Image (cartoon, helix red, strand yellow):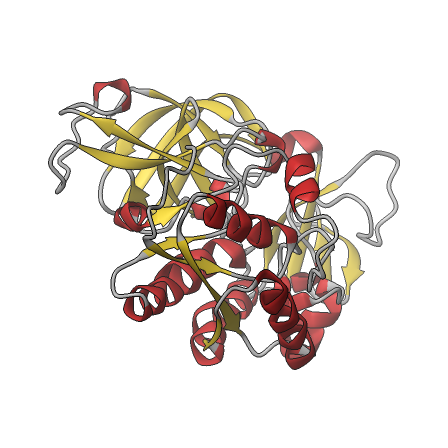
Amino acid sequence: MPVKNGGGSPVTVAFSGGKDSTAAILLLREQGYEVRALTMRLGLTNEDEKLAKIETLARALSVPWQVSDLRNVFKKKVLRYFLDAYRTGLTPNPCVVCNRQVKFGLLLAEAEKNSHGGLFASGHYADKVCLEGPEGPRGGPFRSPTRGGRWFLKEPIDRRKSQIYFLAMIEPTVLEKVIFPIAALTISQVRAKVAGLPLANPDESQDVCFLQGENLGAYLSRHLPESFKAGDIVDRCGNRIGRHQGAIHFTVGQRRGTGHASDRRLYVVGRDLAANTVMLGDEKDLLSRSLTVKTPVFWRPLEVGEKVTVKVRYQLHGHEARISEASPALIRAVFKEPVRAVTPGQFAVFYDNDIIVAAGEIS
C-alpha cells in the first residue's frame, strides 16, 4: 500500500539501523511525516557498540532518536519461550513471538505514548489493505468493530522478501496504527535508497537476532546443558539402530548429521525428549495429510469447507488445503496433497490469495 501524504503527522519508526528501517525513515520524510526513530535495547552481546552506530546513523539522518529498554520483556517473552520450546521437544519460531509480544506490542505502545497517538512504522517487507463492506475475502462475515471494514496483512511488491508470515500472529487491530513504507519497493530499490549512508548493520537482517552468528547447538548446550544426554536412535518400530548425544540436537526432516549410516536415505521423523530418543524413517514418513493449530489468531472468520493456502514455515509457496474445523481454540485443515515436515511448535499461516486470514501454532 503506497504511503499517502503525511501532512506533518507524527510517525515513529522501529529503527534497527539496517537498510530497511533506514529506507522507511527516508520515504516517510519525503511524504511529509514528522518522523521519529525508536530502537529496542534487548540485552544482546555488544549491544552498546551497535547502539552507538545507530545513534550515528540517526544523526546523519537528522531524525530524533530514542532507545526503549525492553531487556526484561524480551528475556521473559522471547528467550524463555525459545528455550522452553526446545526443552519440551518443540521447534520454536522466536521472530513470530517477538513481533507479537515485543515489537508490535510494547514497542508500539511506547511509540504511541511518546507521540500522543501517532502512527507506527517498520521496515518489514509487508503491506496492508482495508477491505470495505460487510464481507471480506471469500464472502466471510467480518464481525468487525470498525464501521466499514477491516485491515489485513497483504503481500508486498517484492514477494521474495515478504515478511508477512512473521507478522501473522500480531493483533489484527494494531494494523489501524501501522504503516509499511517499503511495501512497494524491491530489495534493489531499498539498497539504492540508502546507498552511502553509515548503516549500523549493512548486512541482511538475521532471523534469530540473539544467536548473533552462534551455532544453534552451541547456544542450546550453553543454556540447556541437561538436555544434552546420550540416548538411543530408533527406527519406526522402536528398534535401536544407533546412539546420539542429545535428542534436542535434532530437527524433524533432518537427514545429514544423524550419525547413523544406512544403505538408504533416512530422516529424523520424530523426537521423544522424555525418553531421550530420536526416530529415523523414510521420507514418506515425514508427510502429513492434515494439521491442527492451537491459540489461533483470526483475521477474519474461517468457514468449514473453504479452500485456503497454508504455509507451515517461512517459504515462498504454500500448500492448498481445506478447512475442516475452526473455533477459538483451534483450526484443523486437510491438505490437497501430503506436506513434508509439518513441525509442532512452528506456525501455520492461512492465506486467501495474497492476504492472511488466520494463523496459529502447529500442535
* Image side of residue 199 versus residue 110, left or right: right
The answer to whether residue 228 is seen in the rendering is no
Q: Nearer the viewer, residue 184 or 8?
A: 8
Kindly identify the residue that appears in the image at 50 percent across and 32 percent down: 156
Considering only vertical position in the picture, is 43 above or below 9?
below
Q: Position of residue 326 (x, y in %)?
A: 26, 35
Q: Position of residue 343 (x, y in %)?
A: 54, 45
Considering only vertical position in the picture, is 311 above or below 6?
above
Q: Quadrant of residue 244?
A: bottom right
Q: How many marks?
A: 0
Q: Nearer the viewer, residue 22 or 101?
A: 22
Q: Quadrant of residue 265?
A: top right
Q: Position of residue 243 (x, y in %)?
A: 79, 61
Q: Quadrant of residue 59?
A: bottom right
* Image side of residue 70 versus residue 147, left or right: right
Q: Position of residue 214 (x, y in %)?
A: 75, 67
* Image side of residue 146 versus residue 247, left or right: left
Q: Nearer the viewer, residue 309 or 332?
A: 309
* Image side of residue 288 versus residue 77, left or right: right
Q: Quarter of the image for the N terminus: give it.
A: top left
The answer to whether residue 104 is seen in the rendering is yes
Kindly identify the residue that appears in the image at 31 percent across and 27 percent down: 324
Q: Nearer the viewer, residue 64 or 19?
A: 64
